[in-house]
Amino acid sequence: MNLNLRGAWSILTNELFRFFRTVFGSILSPVLTTSLYIVVFGAAIGSRMDPSQFGGASYGAFIVPGLIMLTLLSESTSNASFGIYMPRFTGAIYELLSAPVGVAETLIGFVGAAAMKSLIIASIILITARLFVDYSIAHPLYAAGYVVLVAAAFSLFGFILGIWADGFEKLSIIPMLILTPLTFLGGTFYSVKMLAEPWRTIAQFNPVFYLINGLRWCFTGHSDVPIGLSLACTLGFVALCIAVIAYIFRTGWRLRG
Amino acid sequence: MSETILDIRGLSKTYKGGLTALDGVDLQIRKGEIFALLGPNGAGKTTLIGAVCGLLRPSGGTIEAFGLDTQRQWRKVRQRIGLVPQELSFDMFAQVEHSVNYSRGMFGCAPDPKRIEQVLRSLSLWDKRDAKIRELSGGMKRRVMIAKALSHDPELLFLDEPTAGVDVELRRDMWRQIGALRDAGTTIILTTHYIEEAQEMADRVGVINKGKILLVDDKDAIMAKLGRSEARITLTEPLPEIPSALDKWHLTLEDENRTLVYAGAEGEGKRAAAELVKAVVAAGIGFEGIVTKESSLEDIFVDLVEGREGLAA
Ligand SMILES: Nc1ncnc2c1ncn2[C@@H]1O[C@H](COP(=O)(O)OP(=O)(O)O)[C@@H](O)[C@H]1O
Ligand SMILES: [Mg+2]
């Protein structure tokens, strides 16, 4: 198989171009929202919290990785789902379907662009957070690799969502009903050690809990779960998404009638 | 006989709901021609194009383009085909030139600003290259669709109803441009439900109805079969009998000899009716009104289908 790398590159740059065309909406709003969380919870309320509950870190430093994860999850999902849903909605998808572009090129283009967008936003948030709280990154290389992996995983997930959806409301319903609650309940703002039973056990069934703790380990060196488990969880999710997407392309589901 | 560029055999497509939109279509397109696929709405024209271009999965049959199987060697095939769909569909907020460059890249071609400039100029889009697509008029938007389809220099170009909803002047303009493309060596397959358009543009015509190709022939041969017009001439005074000077039109008299009716004949179109009127004037017959009627595509299909059944019987 010889890949149409020019095609993949073309899709990728076009998607990024679209992103920067609406730079205010697509960057400013998530950065602003997350900064507000950091200011209100991290800097204002956090100063009254006991650091021993957060592995010795300040509460502000504790929530930064959680908020980065929240951003990555929601931005990756929505960028990727809109990226592929829009051409389906306008009919412009005909061009992709008639072009010498297969699964690999489509994924590099759409999923790659969505992941890059959410990583750009996450980086801006990380830099902005520094203005309000004093955090440090214990394992910077792991952190970088891990956020890239998570961004890719949820961009794949968003891509599937964008192919499945047959209306705009469906695009927002999954993030709203599933992702956001799981992220908030997965320990963005607290350590599960602070929870009483049975909630502490229930929390362990939340997959996002492992993601947040994986990144928290990269930042603070402390985590509620072993990093290996977090990594396995993320890789498993990536593999599942890729399998679903390969199936979609093989059967033409929702793409080729 | 010239080389076959597209070879469709036994192509069928049944949609999920159970509707059979293509029913065993066989069709061969010659290199360098303009082929018009003529058929009423719902005949299966768009479905046929979709099957060739990879927009949908055929239920049966084979399609070869440039001697390559479109299913197995799809990358190589698609690289050489361009498609202008029926509906205007693109990212309306993109700029014209950006959008055309994007298409070229998606088809795996290296950027070529000179070539894109040529394409945009040939479609009178160069002045609008920085405009957002949504700011353009409908006719200009359609040209952007064509520019996108031409951006990778396809050898085979599909135009699905290129002039539907386009006013008469723009339609003529579009025809000229399609002619220019053919002159440059591109093989063109267009669909239409206007007989006039097939007549104006095509080298050969295929008539499709209800998912079946009814006949394929050179344009002139088809037009001879299809171009039937009927004329009714209302006379100022009843005519006792038809003068022998008008014999060749096989006229009949109706309404108590107050109306001369020319029913048309195979191979005789509007021109025959015009000749008839001249002859009526020359014969000194007074008349106060003429109504002519072109046989509609629907009439023609009824004729064709009946003709077929007649042959089979
Ligand atoms: N995606 C689809 N699902 C189900 N039926 C379809 C679909 N697309 C077209 N059809 C049906 O198939 C038939 C042929 O349609 P089409 O190929 O669009 O015809 P044309 O282009 O000649 O007007 C029509 O009856 C149409 O309703
Ligand atoms: Mg159609």
Image (spheres, coloured by chain):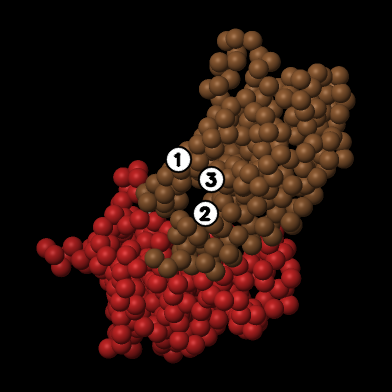
Chain colours: A brown, B red
Mark 3 surroundings within 10 Å by alpha-carbon count, few (fewer than 14), some (14 through 19), many (20 or more)? many
Amino acid bearing label 1: Leu
Which of the two residues, B311 or B101, is positioned nearer the viewer here?
Answer: B101
Amino acid bearing label 2: Leu
Determine which quarter of the picture holds residue A81: top right
Question: Where does residue A55 sit, x and y in percent of width and height?
Answer: 72, 25
Question: Where does residue B93 sit, x and y in percent of width and height?
Answer: 69, 59
Q: Which residue is mark 2?
A: A107
Q: Earlier in the sequence, mark 2 or mark 1?
A: 2
Q: Is mark 3 within 8 Å of ligand 1?
A: no
Q: Secondary structure at mark 2?
A: helix
Looking at the rendered structure, whether the residues under marks 3 and 2 are on a common chain is answered as yes
Q: Which residue is mark 1?
A: A240
Q: Secondary structure at mark 3?
A: helix
Q: Secondary structure at mark 1?
A: helix
Q: Are marks 3 and 1 in contact (CB under 8 Å)?
A: no
Q: Which residue is mark 3?
A: A156
Mark 2 surroundings within 10 Å by alpha-carbon count, few (fewer than 14), some (14 through 19), many (20 or more)? many
Q: Residue at x 61, y 47 (%)?
A: A145
Amino acid bearing label 3: Leu
Quote the CA–CA distance across marks 3 and 1. Answer: 10 Å
Q: Are marks 3 and 2 in contact (CB under 8 Å)?
A: yes
Note whether residue B259 is visible.
no
Residue most toward the top?
A197
Q: Is residue A57 above or below residue A137?
A: above
Question: Where does residue B236 sit, x and y in percent of width and height?
Answer: 47, 74
Quote the CA–CA distance across marks 2 and 1. Answer: 14 Å
Which of the two residues, B47 or B280, is positioned nearer the viewer here?
Answer: B47
Determine which quarter of the picture holds residue B268: bottom left
